Structures are given as C-alpha cells and as structure tokens.
Image (cartoon, rainbow, N blue to C red):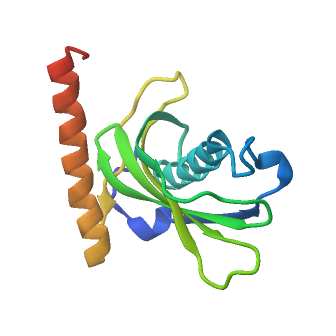
Amino acid sequence: MNLTPATVSRSKVESSEIILQSDLNSMGHLFGGRLVSIIDKIAAISALKHAHRAVVTLSIDRLVFRKPVRAGAIITVKASVNRVFNRSMEVGVIAVSLPFGIMEEEHVCSAYLTFVALDADGKPVEISPILPETNEEKRRFEEAGIRREHRLNLQTKLGKN
C-alpha cells in the first residue's frame, strides 16, 4: 500500500442541510442523535478520502452541544483529518447553524472522532500519514496527540485494554 503522506486539505469535507420538523425532539430543537448521525457520516467521508479504503468509527470524543438548532435552520458540518496514528486517525468536526432569518452562523457542536481503516477481511491496516501545512493544521495535529495520550492513559488507569 502507498503510505505517502497526504495533506489535510485532501480530507476536508463540508456538507449542509436544512433542519425539518422530523429532525426535532420534544423541545422543538434538533434531536441530538440526528446531529451525531450527521457528524459521524461527514467525519467518515473525511476519513475515507484520506484512507482510500473502508473505515469504521472507533470513538467519538468531546462531543459538546453548545446551542440548540430549530426547524428551518441550515446546519453545516465541516470535517478534516487531524492526525494519523498508524491504523487509526482522528477527524475533527465542527457544526455551525444558520438560523432562519439570521445573517451570522452559530457554532453549535464540535467533536473528535477516531476511525480505523480496514482491509477486505475487516482487519485494521496502516494508514498514510497526514501532512499538516498551516499553523492551524499543525496545532490540531499536536492537540490530537495530546487527546490520544489522555485516552490511552485513561484506559490504562481503568484497566480497559
């Protein structure tokens, strides 16, 4: 397999959709599970663009709902690979909302998803490294390493290997 580094920009994905009544919870806001589904799908596309093979979601970290989203709002989810760790990769996601009648987007959710690339037999395989180019991409690359270290330390402390 070609393990030549790829730029972060090659993994960038952006998708928008309008929030409909069927997307709402009993409070009249976007159902959290619906937003998680959108985030997971867009992050998976980013991971697929980088790995060029099947990927599966391993974990979702630091998913924080910051603001409610109402019917009629346009939600835009942006994702890109932050860092690759041999057979897994972290994808950073941000969701913004453009409420009906408002001119400025609102940050509604952020998350970090870890994906594993799989071969035809469903076994984890190595992934090409990511090459951060901008200062922002380099910062996200470094922070992804810190988050991974914390996840692994927590697993060790909890005895979950």
Q: Position of residue 48 (x, y in %)?
A: 54, 49
Along the line of sight, the residue nearer the viewer: 50 or 34: 34
Residue located at (48% from left, 32% from top): 118
Along the line of sight, the residue nearer the viewer: 107 or 81: 107
Res 68 seen here: yes
In this view, the residue farthest toward the top is: 159
In this view, the residue farthest toward the front is: 27
User: Looking at the rendering, in which quadrant would you find the N terminus?
Assistant: top left
Q: Would residue 152 appear left or right of 58 to someone viewing this image?
A: left
Residue located at (21% from left, 31% from top): 152
Say if 70 sits above or below 136 in the image: above
Res 133 seen here: no
Along the line of sight, the residue nearer the viewer: 35 or 53: 35
Q: Position of residue 83 (x, y in %)?
A: 31, 53
Q: Position of residue 52 (x, y in %)?
A: 52, 49
Residue located at (84% from left, 52% from top): 21
Q: Would residue 151 appear left or right of 56 to someone viewing this image?
A: left
Instruction: Give residue 70's quadrant in the image.
Output: bottom right
In this view, the residue farthest toward the bottom is: 103
Say if 27 sits above or below 137 in the image: above
Instruction: Give residue 157's quadrant in the image.
Output: top left
Residue located at (35% from left, 50% from top): 128
Q: Would residue 16 appear left or right of 118 to someone viewing this image?
A: right
Q: How many numbered marks does the figure carry?
A: 0
User: Looking at the rendering, in which quadrant would you find the C terminus?
Assistant: top left
Q: Position of residue 151 (x, y in %)?
A: 25, 35
Say if 29 sits above or below 106 in the image: above
